[in-house]
Structures are given as structure tokens and as C-alpha cells.
Amino acid sequence: MSGVTLLLTGWLGVFVMQGGWFANPLLAVTLLLLLMGRYRGAFWTGFLAVLVGLSSLSWYFHSIPADEGVSPTRQLELLYPTLGFFFWLGSLLVGPVSASILARREAEPKATSPIPVVDVRPHP
């Protein structure tokens, strides 16, 4: 099955207990949160996207019916993931990794900024 076919029809996987496709909308939300500068939310949404994406590996253990008759002899089985699958999983990791790096960069100037010294001595 090609990647384009999976992208367009993957949402149907929910009917056969295969929800890995739903990592794609979570990735979109993660990227949107990154653009808005909401790094904590982007990290956790991205983390959830990675977990949901990894759930697609359950295809190794639970085959998917190849027709509407749910024939036991016509099942789609994942024999091995292709390179595109690994690129897809890598793209899911971009969100939480970027969020943690950007949050750390944003926190560094605040932590190293000099504390203003206030002179509290009475002036004559």
C-alpha cells in the first residue's frame, strides 16, 4: 500500500482497531502550537502523536481485513515497514524535540539575566 493511499484512507483504520493515522492531526496541532510559541503544549501534543504513531506497529500482531467480508484468508499483513514509515515516525519526533529545544532556549536568557540591584541605603 502506498503512503498516499494510507494518508487518504488511514482514518478508516479506527474500524479495525488501528489508530496510528490519527498521529497526523496531532502533528498538525503540535506544529501549530510551536508556531504560536506554546512549547509546553506542543511538547505534550507531540509526545502523544509519537505514541499514537507507534500504535500503528500493532499491525504486526493484528492483521487488517482486505475486504468487507472479513474473510480470514484475505488479510493485509505488515511484513516489514518501508523507509517511508521510518521517515513518518521521524517527522512525528520533530515536534516534541523542537518544543523542548525552543523552550530551553527561551528559558536561558531569563535564567542568566542579571538581577537588578536596588540601592536601599538612605541618601543624605
Image: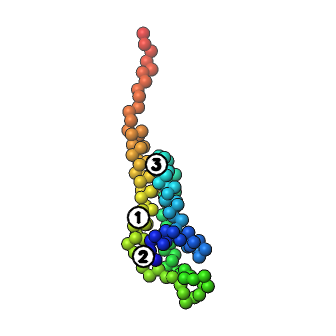
Provide residue 70's location: percent of width, then percent of height.
Answer: 60, 84
Cα distance, mark 2 to mark 3? 31 Å
Could you tell me which secondary element the residue under label 1 belongs to? helix
In the image, residue 73 sits, relative to residue 92, either above or below, namely: below
Provide residue 101's location: percent of width, then percent of height.
Answer: 40, 51
Point 49% across, 68% down: residue: 7
Could you tell me which secondary element the residue under label 3 belongs to? helix
Provide residue 102's location: percent of width, then percent of height.
Answer: 41, 49
Residue that mark 2 sits on: 81
In the image, residue 18 sits, relative to residue 121, either above or below, namely: below
Q: Which mark is residue 99?
A: none
How crowded is the residue under tag 2: few (<14 C-alpha within 10 Å), some, or many (20+)? few
Identity, as a three-letter code, of the amino acid under mark 1: Gly
Point 51% across, 69% down: residue: 8
Depth check: 103 or 123 in front? Answer: 103
Cα distance, mark 1 to mark 2? 13 Å
Point 59% across, 76% down: residue: 16
Identity, as a three-letter code, of the amino acid under mark 2: Pro
In the image, residue 113 sits, relative to residue 77, either above or below, namely: above
Q: Which mark is residue 35?
A: 3
Label 2 vs 3, first from the N-terminus: 3
Q: Residue 90 carries which label?
A: 1
Q: Quadrant of the C terminus?
A: top left
Provide residue 91's location: percent of width, then percent of height.
Answer: 42, 62
Depth check: 75 or 92 in front? Answer: 75
Do residues under tags 1 and 2 come within 8 Å of each other at their CB atoms? Answer: no
